[in-house]
Image (cartoon, helix red, strand yellow):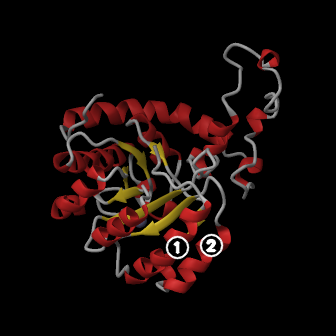
Amino acid sequence: MTRWTTDPRRIAVLATVLAAALIAGMLVVAGLTSDSYRASASPYRPNPRSASAPEQGRPPASAPRGPMRAEPPTRQRAYDGPDGTQRVTGTPSMSLTFDDGPSQFTDEVLDQLDKHGIKATFCVIGSQVRSHAAQMRRIVAEGHTLCNHTWDHDFQLADRTPEQIVKDMVRTNDAIHTVVPNAKVRYFRNPGGNFNHRTVSVAQHLGMVPLHWSIDSRDWESKNAKKIYDLVEENAHPGAVVLLHDGGGDRRETLKALKKLLPFLKERYDLVAMP
Ligand SMILES: [Zn+2]
C-alpha cells in the first residue's frame, strides 16, 4: 500500500488530482445525499438505489447482472450517513468508537474493554499520538482498530482547501505510523461530525472510510455517567456505531458509565471493532 509522506511535492500532486476529482465527486455525493437519503433516521432504511434489488431469499438468478447489479444490501445500508459517510456497521454487530484520544484516560478504557473481551475503534488526534505512544501501541496490540480524527481536532477542516485537508490527514496518519508502523488506519472522522464532500472525498482517496455514528452518547456534553448510560441504553440497536470519548477533556464520567454500559451491551449485542 502506498505510504503517503509529508513530502510537499507529493501533497501538491495529490491535491491537484483531488481538486479535479472533487468536481466529479461533488456530483456523486450530491446524488448520494438527496433529500430522501438525508431524511432517514433508521440505519436499516434501504438505500434508494437498492429499491430494484431482489429481496433476500429470492433466487439469485433473478438478480440483474453486469455493472447495474446492486451490492449486497448490508454494504449499502452502512453508507447511510451525511455526505456518503458510514454511520452503522452494516451488520447486526455493534461498534463502540472512542474519539479525541489518546489521552490519560485511554488506558482505563482499554482496561475495561479488555475485561469484557470487547474490541473497539479509536479515532485518534495526530498531535497527541507521540506523547501517548504506549497507549497507541496498546490499542493496536489489543486488537482495536484506528480512525484518523485530524491532526489537532480541526472543527473547520471541511472549510479548508483540498491541499490543507490532504496535509492534515497525511500528517496524522504519518504520526500514527511513526508509533505503530504497521497499523492500518481504515477510517476517518471529522471533528464534530462536520463532514462535507471535500473531507469525504479526500479521506476516500487516501484509502479511508469516512465514519459517522448512529448513537451519540453526548458524553462530551453531559459529563454525567447516568445520562451517558441511559442515552446509549435507550438508543441501542443492532448495527449501531456509538460515539464515546477517551480524550478531549475530563472523561471520568464516561469511564464510570462504561462500567455499567459494557456488560449491558455485551449481554445483548455482538460488539466488534470497525473492520
Ligand atoms: Zn472529536
- Residue 44 horizontal/vertical position (percent): 72, 49
CB-based contact (under 8 Å), mark 1 and mark 2: yes
**Depicted 35 relative to depicted 65: above or below:** below
Residue kind at label 2, given as amino acid type: Glu
Q: The residue tagged with tag 2: helix, strand or loop?
A: helix
Give the residue number, with chain letter if any, for mark 1.
261
Report the side of 75 relative to 183 (left or right).
right
How dense is the environment of label 1, judged by Cα within 10 Å: few (below 14), some, or many (20 and up)? Answer: some
**Which of the 4 image quarters holds residue 6?**
top left
Residue at 63% x, 49% y is 92
Give the residue number, with chain letter if any, for mark 2.
233
| Residue 155 appears anywhere in the view | no
Query: How many numbered dots are placed on residues in this image?
Result: 2
**Depicted 83 relative to depicted 268: above or below:** above
Residue 68's label in the rendered image is none
Q: The residue tagged with tag 1: helix, strand or loop?
A: helix
